[in-house]
Amino acid sequence: MSLIEVILLPMLMGGIGGLGHILIFKNGHFTFPRKFVDDQGEKHYLFGSTKDIIIGVLAGYLSVLPVIETIPMWYAIYISLLSGIGGSSVITRKIEQNLATTKASYIQELSQYQLELTSKGGSSNHNEVKPVGKVEEKKNQG
Amino acid sequence: MAKWKKKRIKVELPPEDYEKANHYMKRLKEAESVIELNYYYKKMAQIIESSTHFEDGSIEK
């Protein structure tokens, strides 16, 4: 077997599987990688949808690695494609669940405020919004 | 539903803050990472904390 058949083909199929994952599980919503800079000037790199493709590539390669010598090529393609589709959802499930829970708690916290444009005669009373840590603590308790 | 509506706190914001708050809220809902989520939540919290507000529509004198 050539290097292409052993390494590149499973990786390619895994990557295509990762794209399939985006199409199937994320309704084709593709986000490009980007740099996120906060107020302190700290740079954060967000992978976006390329994360699913990278995980698909790795999953596609790793799934056929132990058996690549013993199985026919069409079967290796089949396994790596399926691994690419499924790999992402298995690996990122917990992260996405945590993100969704945190997002829901933040939205719930903010939904108690009704935003309106300034009218005459307002007071200068200050609101108290729970800091990030407290909301997460509350979420963990509940 | 009506009870839930009563509990909401009115937050009055100047136009620029109101636009910012709506923008941050939209970005918060679309956030794809915890970093983004925390950032936009903190921004919203800052805007609300520095705003004029009325609980249940009453005006504090």
Image: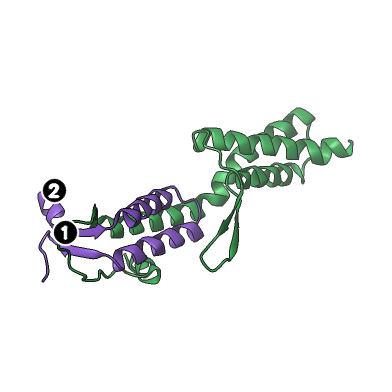
Colour of chain A as rendered: green
Instruction: Identify the residue at the far front of this view.
Output: A120
Q: CA distance from mark 1 to mark 2?
A: 29 Å
Mark closer to the observer (1, 2): 1
Which amino acid type is shown beneath numbered disc 1? Lys
Quadrant in which residue B8 is drawn: bottom left
Residue at numbered disc 2: B1
**In the image, is residue B58 above or below residue A18?**
below
The image position of residue A52, as x and y in percent, is 60, 44
Q: Quadrant of the C terminus of chain B?
A: bottom left
Q: Residue at x 68, y 38 (%)?
A: A15
Q: In front: A11, or A76? A: A11
**In the image, is residue A15 above or below residue B16?**
above
Which amino acid type is shown beneath numbered disc 2? Met
SS at mark 2 in the image: loop
User: Within 10 Å of the Cα at label 2, are there few (<14), some (14-19), or many (20+) other Cα atoms?
Assistant: few
Colour of chain B as rendered: purple
Q: Inspect this view and state whether residue A109 appears.
A: yes
SS at mark 1 in the image: loop
- Total numbered labels: 2
- Please indicate whether residue B38 sits to the left or right of residue B5 in the image: right
